[in-house]
Amino acid sequence: MDAGAAIWEYLGADAPVADLPAMGYGEVASGYATTHSAESVGIIGGGYVGIETAEAFAEHGLDVHLFEMVPHTLQPFGAEAAATVEDHLRKQGIDLHLDTAVEGIDGAGSVERIGTGDHTVPVDLALVGVGVAPNTELAEAAGIELGTTGAIANDRYGQTNDDQVYTARDCAEATHTVTGEPDHVPLALTANRAGRAIGATLAGDPTPIGEIAGTAAVKAFDLEVARTGVIDEESAAEAGFDPVSVTITAQSRAHYYPGGEEIQITLVADRESERVLGASMVGREGVAKRIDTVAAALHAEMTVHQLSYLDLAYAPSFSPVWDPVLTATKVLHGKVAG
Ligand SMILES: Cc1cc2nc3c(=O)[nH]c(=O)nc-3n(C[C@H](O)[C@H](O)[C@H](O)COP(=O)(O)OP(=O)(O)OC[C@H]3O[C@@H](n4cnc5c(N)ncnc54)[C@H](O)[C@@H]3O)c2cc1C
């Protein structure tokens, strides 16, 4: 937050974040702003932070270059959703540099260039958003075991190998509800939930920290993008599934009701068990919370057929009679059962 506030200050914006505690960056940023103005920015990383800051910089009038080292942005959302987001970003004037690993930020006294040896772009500002890794230094020094993901290993109550030490969230593993394996997905709800559960356990009411599905949503200009479960075929195969997927588009409202928008859904299931494994969605409305239907199905270990028979809400202003999730299940059922 403090880095965000500093960038805001540097750009000379009216600062709605001015009440944040001063962390030292603000002074540096405003000093820098008196000698260097920014008309362009190079963002390193096409994840949540990269995509959301691309929008913020563009709305502030900067030319935005977004660098992503792999072929698609928003990796956990799958290639289909990412491709739709990337088309949209380009339409908003964002210069995407995909499959391009930034090797350096150059300049004399200020940022002047960003990129790789044969592909550099002149920019005035650089933003690095390349993901997070669990900070396990303190735990390791205390003899706490890490898991295969590099985060702190723990049992279903969040207890580590030291029975007097519990661990919750961004630094900790949790069990993935689809694969049944430990995973590391640092997000806020599971952090809050695990903290609460551990508190209850320590107060004498043993409470499991719960499983995760990796459910997440992000905003890319006026697009809502959401995901849950296991989407990419490689991860599904590694977890012992035989993944089958479909990508459909459906309307967010009844076809006769004004203002509907297209929703693209990718739904993945296991061929043999027909269990739903995951989904991604993209669209201008009705996406960010619609993913929760699929997340609930994952926790309940539903098959495609069971998901297709859920009684979901319908009113023309909010959904077609067949909710887009139900439409996706029908198409996918034809594929797994056929
Ligand atoms: C820019 C950004 C946007 C995000 N957006 C979303 C979102 O939209 N949805 C979502 O689900 N998640 C989001 N997250 C992730 C979410 O913020 C984290 O998953 C969540 O805050 C993790 O909680 P936590 O308690 O593990 O860690 P934190 O919230 O980071 O809290 C850890 C605290 O421990 C303190 N600390 C560290 N070391 C020590 C020490 N040695 N002694 C004492 N204190 C210490 C830190 O200062 C910090 O206050 C976002 C994260 C970022 C950075």
Image (cartoon, helix red, strand yellow):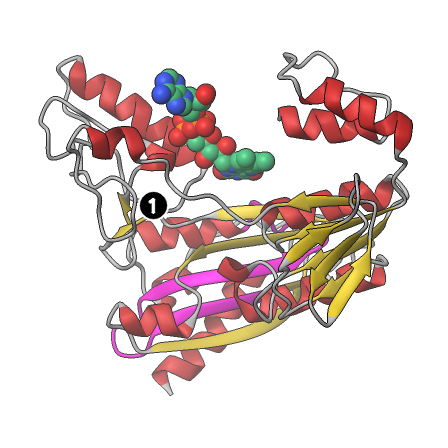
Could you say which is closer to the camera, residue 207 or residue 173? Answer: 173
Residue 272 among those drawn in magenta: yes
Could you say which is closer to the camera, residue 241 or residue 123? Answer: 123
Amino acid type at mark 1: Ile
Could you say which is closer to the camera, residue 246 or residue 198? Answer: 198
Q: Residue at x 50, y 63 (%)?
A: 326
Quadrant position of residue 23: top right
Could you say which is closer to the camera, residue 306 or residue 80? Answer: 80
The answer to whether one can see residue 65 in this image is yes
Residue 150 among those drawn in magenta: no
Image vertical order of residue 24 relative to residue 238, above or below: above
Tell me the magenta residue range: 265-290
Image vertical order of residue 41 relative to residue 332, above or below: above
Locate the N terminus and report the quarter of the image it occupies.
Answer: top right
x then y, percent, for residue 288: 59, 47
Q: What residue is disc 1 on?
A: 212
x then y, percent, for residue 42: 75, 51
